[in-house]
Amino acid sequence: MSYRLFVITLVIGLGLGFLTAHMMIEGQAFSTYRLGPWVTSPDLGDAEATPYARAYRAKHAILENTGRDSLTFVARQDDQGRALDGRCTYLIHGRITTAGWWTLRTTNRFPRGKSSDEAAGTYLNNMNTAQNVDGEISVMAGPRPRPGSWISTPEGNFAIVMSLYDAPFARNLLTTRSSVPSITRLECS
Amino acid sequence: MIKWIFTIISALFLAGGVHALAVLSLPYLADTSLRAQILNAEISHNRFYTLEELNQRGVRLSGHDPNMKIAICPVDLSEAPVSVFAPLFPGYWSISIFDGAMNNITVFNKSSFLNASSQIVLGAEARDAILASDDTIISVILPDVEGYAVLRLMAGLEYFEDEAAQVLRSARCGRWSGN
């Protein structure tokens, strides 16, 4: 092989190798489940996690409980597949089932982003959020306060993070779309 | 033409090898991992640190829930087993045990922790496997001498915030002196 072809081999091989590794680690390849707009990695904290999940954990310094105790769902889109935009107001509606405790928050990036709730002080959890007789929540997420349950949204694209705790049966949710809330865009300013 | 085909195939094989090496070695080499951050920050083992204290020492976690008050005890089992204790709390609480590779070994929480007076004792597999037969403690045997105990509290309501802070201050993680 000529020197030129050797260099080309090296450049393509190294570049492609690192690029695909980065993409698959960030995407937690072979580790995620999707329920509508919600994505979760139930095995992220487990010893049986995929190599991609373990690399993701180490890269971002994540200490995640096993999916047999808790689950974290992240939504970066609404139910229609549009990216969540901080200029818009969304309705998060439905039941959060099979969890003794849960929290809901928004963040400009996940996992390394800043939670806008920390600035606005709008933390929502199962103790301070109203539920109807069917156990459903109706939470508004938007840039301006609304009556009822409301969480603030950061500027630009953002993510909604729903964390379930003391949820030993939460893995059973992973096949039932109706067991997680819907995210509907209402209006944009 | 043949040379170019050979070049592309060689490049793909090289890419596959680099990909596998990068993915498998990252947990051990990343200076962003919790283990590396704690080593670099020269943090003492076998005591609880709140997230604020860790941040002040340059140790940062990602993805943690701001609704939760969190304290982490980097555990060193090289000399003796370590016991973990936290006062009970009316809101949500959990004590999670991780091995040195940040794999979650087990979780104790409000629902699963049936005996409020039991101690949680962490031991190293090579030396302390006998602890598993002791009925007076709840033993967790780690595969190696390093690990983490993570205490999480969620007050849920402002009413319980002060009590949550008190529980964090009272939490203990230290050398177990035995019964």
Image (cartoon, coloured by chain):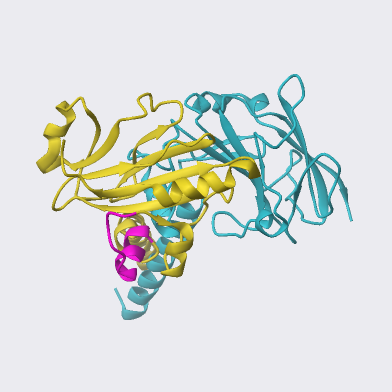
Chain colours: A cyan, B yellow
Please provide percent x and percent y for residue B66.
58, 51
Left or right side of A64 for A140: right
- Identify the magenta region: B33-47
Query: Which quadrant would residue B5 be assigned to in this image?
Result: bottom left
**A161 and B170: which is toward the camera:** B170
B43 in magenta: yes
Question: Where, by quadrant of the figure, is residue B22 drawn?
Answer: bottom left
Total number of numbered labels?
A: 0
Magenta span contains residue A71: no
Residue A74, position as x, y percentages in the image: 60, 44
Whether residue B81 appears in this view of the structure is yes
Q: Is residue B157 above or below residue A179?
A: below
- Above/below status of B52 relative to B158: below
Q: Nearer the viewer, residue A94 or B71?
A: B71
Name the residue located 20 percent from the left edge and 44 percent from the top edge: B176
Residue A29 shows in this picture: no
Give the residue at x 28% y 51%: B100
Q: Which residue of the protein is positioned furthest toward the top in this rendering? A: A134
Q: Is residue A161 above or below residue B37?
A: above
Task: Tell whether A126 sits left or right of A169.
Answer: right
Image quadrant for the N terminus of chain B?
bottom left
